[in-house]
Image (cartoon, rainbow, N blue to C red):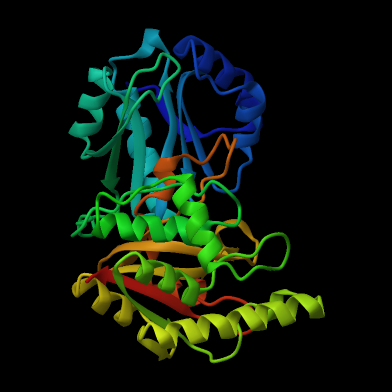
Amino acid sequence: MSNLVIRKALNSDLNALIDVENACFNNDKLSPRSLKRWLSAKHGILLIAENGEQVCGYGLVWCHKGTRLARLYSLAVKPTMQGKGIAKMLLAALEKQTSERGRIYLRLEVAVNNDSAIGLYKSLGYRVFGQYSDYYHDHSDALRMQKNIRKTSELKVARLTPWYQQTTEFTCGPAALLMAMGALKPTTELSQSHELALWREGTTIFMTSGHGGCHPFGLALAANKRGFKSEVMVNTTEPLFLDGVRNENKKVVLATVHEQFVDGIAQANIPLMHKDVELEHIEQWLSQGFSVLLLISTYSFDGKKSPHWVCVTHLDEHCVYVHDPFCEPGSDKQLAIDCQYVPIARSDFSKMSAFGGQRLRTAVAIANN
């Protein structure tokens, strides 16, 4: 189409975007408020297809903050303009701009019965890597697809790792451990009851606010108790997480719990290495058949300096990939697809894997006995 132009959406395009949305969707529509927010979203890419002065379609990508991952949030072309290659042109422009923002993978979800869309995505290099059941308003399933838009080597996962979403704000450690155990032992029960049982065994009691998260030694002991071989790496011999707690009584409790875990590690003969966790250590563990839990700072993700446990799934020459157990509840942006096999650039690893004023670096590795 010689008159077709792909350009960045402007605030003045809001009404036209609403018209496209209403023409294309009966259910699961983006609200006018949501579309208005996306027009100025820092991590969004919103492009429109304009034929003359008529907006006939749009495409929206969300760039996952702090990672090399992006998701096609919405792609719509008015029914009267379909079949003219507009969707393909929009997607090509979105891929280009997404790549220019440093993202490596672009992911999307599509209804399993939407043969035309699936055919389009496959023709453009997207590959199926999973499926959601009962995903849409009409209870139909969705395929998960992704494309390497930077032409780096394709993601190859040596061992599939189940994804489990933490059910409380303080159980990222147990959720990550469930995923690690599930990768090694597929019969592992992935449930809230198991998650909370692990938390009770591994908690530090207190944290900056609210309930405490989990100590690496506690997670290692919990895995050991369930028949797994555990190893721990940490770059300090001091009690952990003290700099995030101001109350002196709570600090005493944290220190006491730490010493109890130290004794437990010694009694269980769990290997403990006092050194900075580097990518080479994670690479070695994975090559030896271990699953790895890594403590990161969430600052790059959400601007909050909180300790957070993730499960490492894979490394390649560009990225370290993790399953993140946290998926923001009630969010209209984040979906489970955004939390699985999340690519983090190797160059960002050092910054992301250090937490707090202590620059704490720690990881737990588990394997089958």
Residue sitting at 47 percent across and 53 percent down? 195
Picture coordinates of residue 177, whole percent (x, y) = 40, 61
Q: Position of residue 88 (x, y in %)?
A: 30, 29
Q: How many numbered dots are placed on residues in this image?
A: 0
Judged from this view, the residue extending furthest toward the top is 80
Residue 310 shows in the view: yes
Tell me where residue 231 appears, x and y as whole percent. 35, 79
Residue nearest the observer in this picture, 358 or 82:
358
Left or right: 108 with respect to 308? Answer: left
Viewport quadrant of the C terminus: bottom left
Of 134 and 261, nearer the camera is 261
Q: Residue at x 23, y 19 (%)?
A: 115
Quarter that holds the N terminus: top left
Left or right of residue 339, residue 114 in this image: left
* Residue 176 horizontal/vertical position (percent): 43, 59
Q: Residue 93's quadrant in the figure?
A: top left
Residue pictured at 67% horizontal, 78% vertical: 254
Q: Residue at left 38%, top 82%?
A: 268
- The relative height of residue 50 versus residue 182 in the rendered view (above or below) is above
Residue 66 visible in the displayed image: no
The image quadrant of residue 276 is bottom left
As displayed, is residue 341 above or below residue 363?
above
